[in-house]
Amino acid sequence: MLSNCQRLNFTVSKKDLTDENGIFKIAINSKLHKLLSPALEREYDTEHKFSLVIAIRENPVNMKNTGKLYDEIMAINATESIGSLSADLEAEA
């Protein structure tokens, strides 16, 4: 089995979020490795499970965080600790 793990870090400015009406979009692309033979490519012509982890950090202004970022995230999303999510995934497997 071939696998790939990548870690990316980038900054999204307030202006970028405002320009997108406060919507943050993520796109994920999965491609077969160029060294796979055609026979193996057919075997992998299925849906692929993947995990996505996002860490969000507020960049302080004048060395002070506003705290508003996390308040909004907590207000509109169901959040769970990674430990409980891992246990749920293992139970499903």
Image (tube, grey):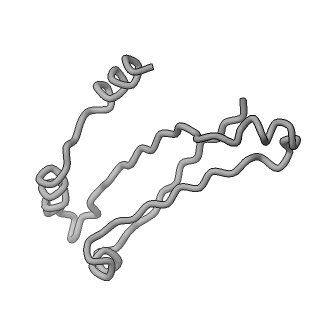
Residue 25's spot in the image, x, y percent?
39, 65
Whether residue 25 sits left or right of residue 69 in the image: it is right
Q: Residue at x 84, y 42 (%)?
A: 36
Within the image, what quadrant is residue 78 found in?
top left
Q: Nearer the viewer, residue 33 or 81?
A: 33
On the image, the x and y values in percent for residue 58 come to 26, 60
| Above or below, 66 relative to 83 | below
Marks counted in the figure total: 0
Quarter assignment of residue 89: top left
* 91 to 65, vertically: above or below: above
| Quadrant for the N terminus in the image | top right
Image position, residue 45 (x, y; %)? 70, 42
Which residue occupies 24% across, 64% down? Answer: 60
**Nearer to me, 59 or 14:** 14
The answer to which quarter of the image holds residue 17 is bottom left
Check the picture and name the quadrant holding the C terminus: top left
Q: What residue lies at 26% left-to-right and 77% top-to-bottom?
A: 21
Residue drawn 31% across the image and 80% down it: 15
In the depicted structure, whether residue 92 falls above or below residue 44: above
Compared to residue 62, the image places residue 82 above or below, namely above
* Residue 76 point in image, percent of width and height: 15, 54
Image-based side of 27 in relation to 45, left or right: left
